[in-house]
Image (cartoon, helix red, strand yellow):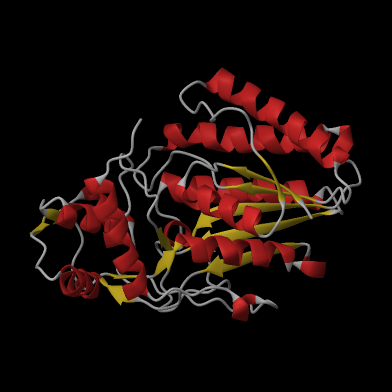
Amino acid sequence: MKTVWVVGAGGLLGAALWHRSTALGDDVFVPGERLAWAERARLIAQLQANAGAFAQRVAASASRAWEVYWAAGVGTMSSPAEALMLETEALGVLLEALAAHPALAGTPGAIGFASSAGAIYAGALDEIISEITPVAPTTPYARAKLQQEDLVRAFAAARPDTRALLARFSTLYGTGQAVGKQQGLLTHIARSIVRHQPVQIFVPFDTIRDYLRVEDAAAHMICALRETGPAHQLTKIIASEHPTTIAEIVATFRRLARRSPRIVTSASARAGLYGRRMQFRSTLALHGHEDLPATNLTVGIAQLLEAERARFTHPPQH
């Protein structure tokens, strides 16, 4: 059994990582309060205190084996560079606190960092993008992710007993997508259909994306981190590897909802931030991945619609 800390467990991917780790029987560390991203000094103090509490939890465990998953942050593809500096600083503070704590010295540890393939390879020219494709960032968000990856690499390089996974995900979707965050096309379409509202689409209908159910993403990330083996550090694209156009997405929603969504198309500055044809294929086959979940997109969209209907009928109580 490992002691696991998911930083950002309140988010879409973080929640899925938390549930997966719990289901695997790990001892999941849960801090007492959510991270205060709007208050820098408080955020830094929280990360330092949480790192100390986590280290003590590891020291008290039988195996002393630990994993930290970073799935935190509030930035998006359209965020300016200044807004992303705090995320990079926060990750650095966490890694420094872990490195400095004597309870973790000599313990077998691992860091899993969630990154964005769509952002990092946005300007790539390869028809099919893999781990050997040169990174091609076009936004401050992508450049910040690459800086954060470098921090994780340096942390693991300085600790021979610590492994690192840089997980570059395709487009994630799931039933826990934040309402106020400007991302998540599938969730936006599902919510609009259920509420009989227009569906706003800002990219051409022939735009190709790779949609990956977040629960599947979490399972693959945990498996990949635990299978890094002698490589010590691993960069891996995690995607469904089934490219889909926006037109196919709309048609699937129409078929499942049994009515045509009201589509409103318009230009947006955000549309130019992404590549038109994002197709991914990992060249790294890891042991055990063949047994992991791979949800069909039609099934995933049906689950989204059902979850949004339930949310609309019985709104969550705050």
Q: Percent position (x, y) of residue 165? A: 67, 59
- Quadrant for the C terminus in the image: top left
Quarter of the picture holding the N terminus = bottom right
Q: Is residue 192 left or right of residue 127?
A: left
Q: Is residue 162 left or right of residue 181?
A: right
Q: Which of 151/239 is in front?
A: 239
* Residue in the picture at 27% in, 44% down: 314
Tell me which residue sits at (40%, 54%) in the image: 138
Q: Residue furthest right?
A: 106
In the rendered image, residue 230, in percent from the top left (x then y), is placed at: 82, 68
| Residue ID at (28%, 52%) | 310
Is residue 201 in sight in this rendering?
A: no
Q: What percent of the width, then of the height, locates residue 41?
A: 57, 18
Q: Quadrant of residue 57?
A: top right
Q: Quadrant of residue 121?
A: bottom left
In this view, the residue in front, 131 or 200, is: 200
Judged from this view, the residue extending furthest toward the front is 314
Above or below residue 84? Residue 211 is below
Q: Is residue 171 above or below residue 9?
A: below
Q: In the rendering, at what x and y percent does residue 40 appear?
A: 53, 22
* Residue 41 in view: yes
Task: Tally the numbered discs.
Answer: 0
